[in-house]
Amino acid sequence: MFFDSEDWQTIIFRLSMAMAVGCLIGYNRQRGGRPAGLRTFIIASLGAALFVMIPLQAEGDVGYASSNALSRTIQGVASGVGFLGAGIILQQSHRELNKVQVKGLTSAATIWLAAGLGAASGCGLWQMVLVGTLFSLCTLSGIKRLKKNKSLGKYIKGRKKISPINQEINPSDNSASH
């Protein structure tokens, strides 16, 4: 099977979009000192796009592609990247054997998300990729900022009532205490 010039443009666009998504998310994670960084996310997203594009490109050759090859490929990518994410979680947990603490869940979920966005890019669903990337970056950056907020941090760390937040907003108002 040979590609014409339109195929090459499509291939370059889809793979470039997958790389850009992996780069943006990977930069966000690397900047925060997380276990998986720029290269890992680019490779996961690009790899997912490549795997998804194979049955799409081979679709023209009836003997080579089946009708559900794309679905099976996407399932395989999701499972494979899930194992990669599990490795990130285990690697983080192994460092501190004296504590029962699981670390790396967000990194594992984020690498799975990056692969999903790469798969969507490989399918040519660029609108979905743009919105998904925007939402993922807002989630990764926005939730972190919310946790750093001291008044919200008090509520998150185990307070059952919202009164600590109200007291910090209106310290003179004693009715907010209970």
Image (cartoon, rainbow, N blue to C red):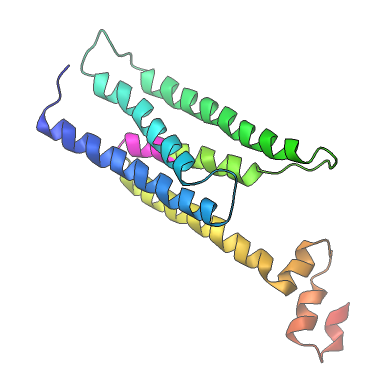
Count of labels shown?
Answer: 0
Q: Is residue 123 left or right of residue 141?
A: left
| Residue sitting nearer the eye, 105 or 71 | 105
Magenta stretch holds residue 163: no
Q: Where are the magenta residues, as a range?
A: 117-124
Vertical relation: 2 (above or below) 91: above
Q: State the residue lying farthest toward the bottom.
A: 172
Name the outermost residue toward the front.
Answer: 95
Point 47% across, 53% down: residue: 27
Horizontal and vertical percent position of residue 134: 44, 56
Q: Main secondary structure of the magenta part?
A: helix
Left or right position of 101 against 89: right
Where is residue 108 drawn, in percent x and y? 59, 40
Would you identify the image quadrant in which residue 103 lies? Answer: top right
The image quarter containing residue 59 is top left
Identify the residue at image location x=15%, y=25%.
3
Residue 13 in the image: state x and y as whole percent. Answer: 24, 41
**Where, quadrant-wise, is the N terminus in this rendering?**
top left
Judged from this view, the residue extending furthest toward the right is 178
- At x 21%, y 13%, the residue is 61
Q: Quadrant of residue 93?
A: top right
